[in-house]
Image (tube, rainbow, N blue to C red):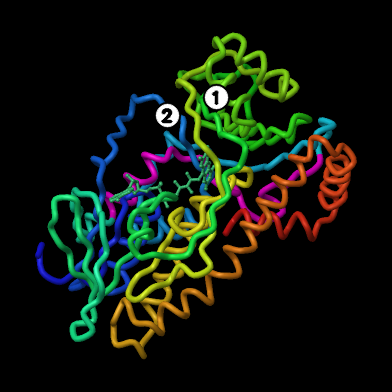
Amino acid sequence: MNDGLFDVVVAGGGPVGWACALAAKISLGKRAKVAVVERDPLPVVNADDPISARVYTVASGNLAWIHEHGVKIDEARSAAVTDIQVFGRDGSDSLHVDANDAGLNELARVIEHEALALAIAKRAQQVGVTLIAGECIALHDGDAETGTRTVELADRSLLQARMVLAADGAHSRLREAAAMDVSWHQYPQHGVVANLRCTEPHRGIARQWFLPDGSILALLPLPSVEGTPSVSMVWSAATEHAELLSALPESELLAEINAASAGAVNVHAVISGTRSFPLGLLRLPNPVGQRFLAVGDAAHAMHPLAGQGVNVGLADARCLFDLWQSAPDVHGDPGHALLLSRYRRQRYGPTLAIQLATDGLFRLYNQVDHPFLMAAGDAGMRLFGRLPAFRRTLSSSALQ
Ligand SMILES: Cc1cc2nc3c(=O)[nH]c(=O)nc-3n(C[C@H](O)[C@H](O)[C@H](O)COP(=O)(O)OP(=O)(O)OC[C@H]3O[C@@H](n4cnc5c(N)ncnc54)[C@H](O)[C@@H]3O)c2cc1C
């Protein structure tokens, strides 16, 4: 047995796993023993490293929450999003949301995956969360007397905890070990990402195009590189098209991007190499088990078209924080069944709503054989985009 009894063990040190560990340590108090088990070394981010190609638009509500708990995001390596502009397949501006609609200076901030995970990890370790290097491979039944569960690592060491969180990503090994029901739908698309230099300033606008071939191109603000404006590209394209894009010589890739985005920012150089990710929709009818909970992508992976994956995961951590902090009837027990059923009630609706919305939009715009449906989608988006109430709702959901 490794290190005695933990209050909370989190499997997976991605941004969501570290946010949950931070939430646990702060809400359960100084004496609580909290650990994160991560199979890979902590990322290293040096000030002069190029920005990584895997970036997130972190909603301002989530940013405010992590700041409030002492997490420091390097502003020089992140960029503010003040406007969101969506173009239908006819190329017209279908929807425009700006920070003014929400009465704020910025809607979100674009941050690298590595920098976000590292910033939260640093703060969590500062307040006393332990990092255990290892790979979680199994979950053993709880001991009814001590009210615990046991996590087994690849080196056969065992961790006993009153609460175990699976935050080990969409292909979660621990969720599998807990034998949870899972529904998984692989989208016929991959997300191709790259960072690009451009000649036109992005002016803090996150732009997205639903293209006639069913693919979706997003260009997100990045900090300038040596005084040159730059953007992050996420192009969700049919798998074969994605392979083609990833293999194109730089000049041809840039020409494709400029053609698809009508030269909105005029990209002229690739800063990072391209990377490609398979895209899928993962749903769990119930993420709660005995002293066990799946969070983040382990509970709800989704299409990146709304840039909400990591935001929904951070909202899981915030919900746990509130429940752990204000549940006097569970006697400080972080894995109490009452607390977990409250978590399920509170997170079920919002998670389902965002998954239905992203999946519905993907399906509507992927009807390349049904031009009428796609045109109806464009018209609907334009109509809704003119309604101030709709824009307010959208901006507040972007804020999480
Ligand atoms: C192309 C693309 C673009 C995206 N863009 C956005 C965006 O703009 N905004 C947004 O909000 N989301 C976006 N997402 C989604 C986002 O990547 C995920 O939602 C996010 O990474 C989930 O964080 P997580 O911490 O739950 O999981 P992960 O980031 O997957 O972290 C899981 C961690 O667990 C570790 N691990 C795995 N197995 C084990 C094990 N057995 N034992 C120990 N450790 C283990 C891994 O090493 C990893 O560190 C995008 C996704 C893709 C594919």
Asked if marks 1 and 2 touch (Cβ < 8 Å), the reply is yes
**Residue 185 x %, y %:** 58, 49
In depth, the one of 266 and 79 nearer the eye is: 266
The three-letter code of the residue at mark 1 reads Ser
Mark 1 or 2, nearer chain start: 2
Report which quarter residue 159 is drawn in.
bottom left
Please tell me how crowded label 1 is: few (under 14), some (14-19), or many (20+) other residues with Cα within 10 Å: many
Q: What label sits on residue 248 in the rendered view?
A: none
Can residue 308 be seen by looking at this rendering? Answer: no
Q: State whether label 2 is within 8 Å of ligand 1.
A: no
The three-letter code of the residue at mark 2 reads Ile
Q: What label sits on residue 51 in the rendered view?
A: 2
Query: For the magenta stretch, what is the residue range?
Result: 94-123
Residue identified by numbered label 1: 230
Q: Is residue 119 left or right of residue 360?
A: left
Q: Is residue 7 above or below residue 131?
A: below
**Residue 167 x %, y %:** 37, 56
Secondary structure of the residue carrying tag 2 is loop
Q: Is residue 76 left or right of residue 395?
A: left
Q: Residue at x 43, y 38 (%)?
A: 112
